[in-house]
């Protein structure tokens, strides 16, 4: 009972209840219709109540199906709410303007258009999200880059979110495309999983087949921490990935050195209060002059990365908002490091829009990406 009275659950319950009340008021005319609309709202409420606040792990196929259904409902209701608001705005303006014909037309056909439009938006968004990431090529000019590092290539995989809606086939597709690029280094910048190794080990198994001249590196994202950070770091090590926890990896190419530093995600403090991100440790100052690349899941760590002397930070976390209106909301939180290339002082920052998608498997106004980064002399 205590979890139902937590601030999180009270807030969530209020949001779901208000959303349902508004949609039922504006879109339904019968008790049967209101009951049907209540089902997706209930599904959205159940997952955080039972699994997140209740601490239940997703270990069975039924758990995964419930999550997938709830996420799809969340995506659909997002578009349904937006289109309902748009309908009411048009209706209100028509009445103020005395356009009785327009108002009558909106009243008559508005509801079916809203339902059809929301389902179409969900279908298109899901198709874009689940067909696999597009390849994004990025050239980053580094001032004073050693000649031996000209053209050094990095494949970035971020926010894959293997779980209820993304499985082994999707992961294998990502691995095959990465290997075809023949990179010097592969980096997995967090949020790779949503669930336990018991459930997801077969689905992440293709990651063991990643190939790069200098291997593959993994850092924790917040969802990896929620899913059991230590269990997953052990599992990823068993797949041959190098895991960096406020640590660094020293690479050499000709007479040039590259320090790849990786920090833990702030979410690790939920289970390990002393585990804070330490870019100053990951920078390995004792290694002397070198190109320094920081892997930090959350772009909010850019200030610390720049202070530690890194030349480039690779992050994820934002998903570029995934779909409207969250594409706007994420800019309020993470600007200017929302997606793509930006600067923090002298340090370049690249934020991946995500190789997968979390929650609703929907992309609207954004694309999933597999990122190929090449270093160039500035």
Image (cartoon, rainbow, N blue to C red):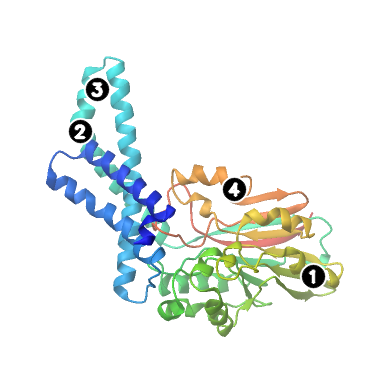
Q: CA distance from mark 3 to mark 1?
A: 67 Å
Q: Position of residue 149 (x, y in %)?
A: 78, 67
Q: CA distance from mark 1 to mark 4?
A: 27 Å
Quarter of the figure with residue 239: bottom right
Which residue corresponds to mark 1? 284
Taking 338 as reference, is 108 left or right?
left
Q: Position of residue 62 (x, y in %)?
A: 29, 72
Q: Residue furthest bottom?
A: 238
Q: Position of residue 308 (x, y in %)?
A: 78, 60
Task: Judge the density around disc 1: few (<14), some (14-19), many (≥20) Cα neighbours within 10 Å.
Answer: many
Q: Which mark is residue 109?
A: 2
Marks 3 and 4: which is nearer the front?
A: 4
**Secondary structure state at the residue bearing disc 3:** helix
Q: Earlier in the sequence, mark 3 or mark 1?
A: 3
Count of numbered badges drawn on the protein: 4
Q: CA distance from mark 4 to mark 2?
A: 39 Å
Q: CA distance from mark 1 to mark 2?
A: 64 Å
Q: Which mark is residue 334?
A: 4
**Secondary structure state at the residue bearing disc 4:** helix
Which residue corresponds to mark 3? 102
Q: CA distance from mark 3 to mark 4?
A: 41 Å
Task: Judge the density around disc 2: few (<14), some (14-19), many (≥20) Cα neighbours within 10 Å.
Answer: few
Q: Earlier in the sequence, mark 1 or mark 2?
A: 2
Q: Earlier in the sequence, mark 1 or mark 4?
A: 1
Identify which residue is drawn at 40% across, 61% down.
130
**Secondary structure state at the residue bearing disc 1:** loop
Quarter of the figure with residue 23: top left
**Secondary structure state at the residue bearing disc 2:** helix
């Amino acid at each position: 009972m205590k979890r139902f009275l937590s601030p999180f659950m009270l807030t969530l319950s209020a949001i779901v209840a208000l959303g349902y009340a508004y949609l039922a008021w504006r879109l339904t005319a019968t008790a049967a219709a209101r009951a049907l609309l209540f089902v997706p709202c209930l599904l959205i409420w159940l997952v955080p109540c039972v699994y997140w606040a209740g601490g239940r792990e997703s270990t069975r196929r039924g758990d995964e199906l419930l999550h997938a259904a709830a996420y799809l409902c969340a995506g659909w209701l997002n578009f349904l709410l937006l289109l309902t608001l748009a309908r009411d705005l048009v209706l209100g303006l028509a009445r103020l303007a005395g356009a009785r014909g327009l108002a009558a037309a909106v009243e008559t056909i508005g509801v079916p258009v809203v339902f059809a439009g929301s389902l179409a938006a969900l279908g298109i968004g899901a198709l874009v999200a689940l067909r696999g990431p597009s390849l994004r090529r990025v050239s980053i000019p580094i001032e004073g880059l050693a000649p031996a590092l000209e053209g050094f290539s990095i494949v970035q995989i971020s926010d894959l979110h293997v779980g209820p809606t993304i499985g082994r086939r999707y992961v294998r597709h990502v691995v095959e495309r990465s290997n075809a690029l023949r990179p010097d280094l592969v980096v997995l910048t967090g949020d790779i999983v949503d669930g336990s190794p018991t459930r997801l080990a077969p689905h992440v198994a293709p990651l063991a087949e990643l190939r790069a001249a200098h291997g593959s590196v993994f850092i924790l994202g917040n969802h990896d921490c929620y899913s059991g950070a230590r269990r997953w770091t052990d599992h990823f090590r068993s797949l041959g990935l190098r895991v960096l926890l406020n640590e660094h990896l020293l690479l050499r190419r000709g007479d040039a050195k590259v320090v790849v530093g990786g920090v833990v995600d702030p979410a690790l403090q939920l289970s390990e209060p002393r585990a804070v991100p330490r870019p100053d440790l990951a920078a390995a100052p004792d290694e002397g002059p070198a190109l320094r690349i920081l892997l930090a899941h959350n772009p909010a760590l850019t200030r610390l990365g720049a202070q530690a002397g890194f030349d480039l930070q690779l992050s994820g976390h934002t998903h570029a908002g995934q779909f409207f209106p969250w594409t706007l909301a994420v800019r309020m939180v993470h600007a200017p490091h929302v997606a793509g290339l930006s600067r923090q002082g002298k340090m370049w920052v690249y934020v991946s829009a995500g190789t997968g998608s979390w929650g609703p498997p929907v992309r609207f106004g954004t694309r999933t990406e597999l990122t190929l980064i090449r270093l160039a002399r500035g």
